[in-house]
Amino acid sequence: MKKILIAALACALLAPTAAVEAKGGKSSKKKEPVVATVNGRDVTLGELEYLYKKNNSQQTAPQSLDEYLDMFIVYKLKVADAESEGIDTTANFRREYKQYVSDLAAPYLRDKAMADSLLNVAYDHKKTERKFSFIQLPLGEDNHARLDSIRNCVINGEDFTALAIQYSIDPNVRRSGGELGFISGGMIPYEIEDPVYTTPIGDYSPVFDTRYGVLFVHPIAERANRGERKVRHILKLTQGASPEKKAEAKAQIDSLLTLIKNGADFAEVAKMESEDPGSRDQGGLIQWFGSGRMVPEFEEAAFSLAPGEISDVVETAYGYHIIKGEDARSVGTLDEERPGLEATMERNGMSKMPLKRVLKGLRGKYGVTYNPKARTLVKSLVETAGQLDSTVFRPMVASPENAATVGDRAVTLKDMSFVMVPINARNVDSAMNAYDTLLEEEIDKKVMELAIEDLPEENADFRNVINEYRDGILLYEVSNKNVWNRANTDKEGLEKYFEENRDKFSTWTEPRYKGYVMLATNDSVAAVAKEITDANPGMPISDLSKLLKEKVGNQLRMEKVLAKKGDNAVVDYAAFGGEKPAPHARWSEFFIFNGKFISQPEEVTDVRGTVNADWQQYLEKEWVKSLREKYPVTINKKVLKKLK
């Protein structure tokens, strides 16, 4: 419930439209005029204006500033009370607030123009398919130079496929010769996709480093995106089969094709005969796929079919297929594709680039210093150990050396040991490449920390939003303690309030039946139950329930009721002499017991909901009264006039 209430408070917190630009030095925010002071804490005109406008945008009948101001002051008094109780210093509060600020800051710390540009790039790539080949070597400075030499050999006329098979670490190279086939935007990591699409067809990209290794790519062909297809298929497996079994499978698939062409239902035949476990139970259905998702023979056949059309037998490395076209769709407009593009950009790393650009600029603002001694130490440890293991990490944890500093923040070798632990490095070059990459990430984290700390001073929108969320958490916690939770848990207080205000709740105009209703599965069971209840009028309900269960099992149900005529069909029948209601579920017989008619509530439980709500209002009123007496408030009317 807490998260729902806080989310409701912050529901209008929209992402900003302007990016934070890197600055040459620490900015100084122009001091905002103070419109009020509550318990020694200043409230700026900007904060009041932000919340006042937001409040009115959510109201059907906008409030005047004077009307809103009193509500605003009460809000700030409650926050002051939460602060005086130390709620803002608890570990839970700090953790929740810090996470929220971090999450909210990301859209502010990004290059919006670049983000928009990248979305258009992603869309352009999606509209086009490219076929390319590549050669990949492991990470490392030596391998970068080695791959550059291989690239020069290709440019000078040596056979690309032969060199790929000889040198590339791609596990599929012997089958593919380094060729990946057609892909469209979003199918591969962007660090590879970008050179595939920016290198001219027939040319060779420069050698570039990725987290997967050192590569260069060779775009071979380009075509418009063929869209996506949905198909059904029937498969007879032949992978690893003997010639005899393969011939048997061919005869079977030919027979099935004849059966289908003679009118048999494709989906039913697939359910009975297909040997593809992933689609058989769905009648052979394969959901939407585009180029590069299926083996080439299957893909070409599927894209050649119109909806409803059935292929001849298609052979792939897996076996023999019959394919039926189900549906086809082309690439949509940018707005139609936007949700999918944004999800793809999140997966392939494009979405991080606008933030990285801003962080790169902010490095100059805060200052980054590298410690080459730390890197030399790590390299010597890796060379001695021959791998990344505890013999490397233990000395790193104990080392006083900083790997780098950002402003007044240090990235220690101890920090680096923690992020390097899960890295699987093949050799020293690979380990040090991981060190360099992870160090840059840790530096970016420190830059981000500093930027987030400065952001409230530099961006009024951000400052207002996080202040509102902060106060919202405090408001929830302190209100829960003083009003909501107390009203629900202080039974003595609730009963006392009822007794002191009994006349206030004695407003019934019709009598109620207060007692129990017995529901039975048939008249025989009802008769047994009535006999037992009549014989034991003073027995505690828990004991009576146990006795009844021993006699008739689960053929009875007791319900405690308080109802006036018209509230409950069973009570209307059993207590007020109305018509017998139709059987409900398994219950066909009803009678009342241990009950009476009352004209007004006897105890707080008779009107708990009403009393509880009224008591909460009373607690709220008394709390606010005490807050006004406890905490001083001053209003700067001269500044306030600027909003009127």
Image (tube, rainbow, N blue to C red):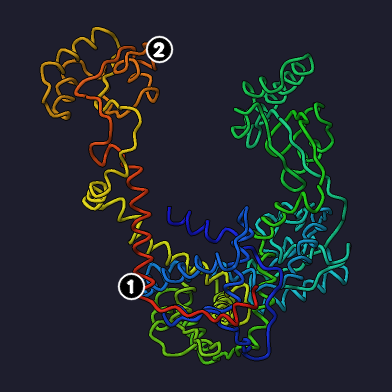
Q: Which residue appears at 18% of the width and 11% of the height?
A: 528
Q: Which mark is residue 137?
A: none
Real-space CA distance between mark 1 and mark 2, rounded to the nearest whole angstrom: 58 Å
Q: Secondary structure under badge 1?
A: loop
Who is closer to the viewer here, 43 or 365?
43
What amino acid is labelled 2 in the image? Answer: Ala
Q: Which residue appears at 17% of the width and 20% of the height?
A: 548
* Left-right relation of 399 to 492: right
Decide: few, some or many residues near mark 2? Use Cα within 10 Å; few <14, some 14-19, many ≥20.
Answer: few
What is the quadrant of residue 544 in the picture? top left
Who is closer to the viewer here, 489 or 348?
489
Q: Which residue is mark 1?
A: 85
Residue 55 vertical placement versus 579 (above, below):
below
Task: Tell me which numbered mark, 1 or 2, is placed earlier along the sequence.
Answer: 1
Who is closer to the viewer here, 539 or 265?
539
Percent x, y for residue 239?
65, 36
Q: Which residue is mark 2?
A: 582
Q: Which residue appears at 30% of the width and 12% of the height?
A: 589
Percent x, y for residue 527?
21, 9
Percent x, y for residue 212?
64, 66
Decide: few, some or many residues near mark 1? Use Cα within 10 Å; few <14, some 14-19, many ≥20.
Answer: few
Who is closer to the viewer here, 327 or 487?
487
What amino acid is labelled 1 in the image? Answer: Glu
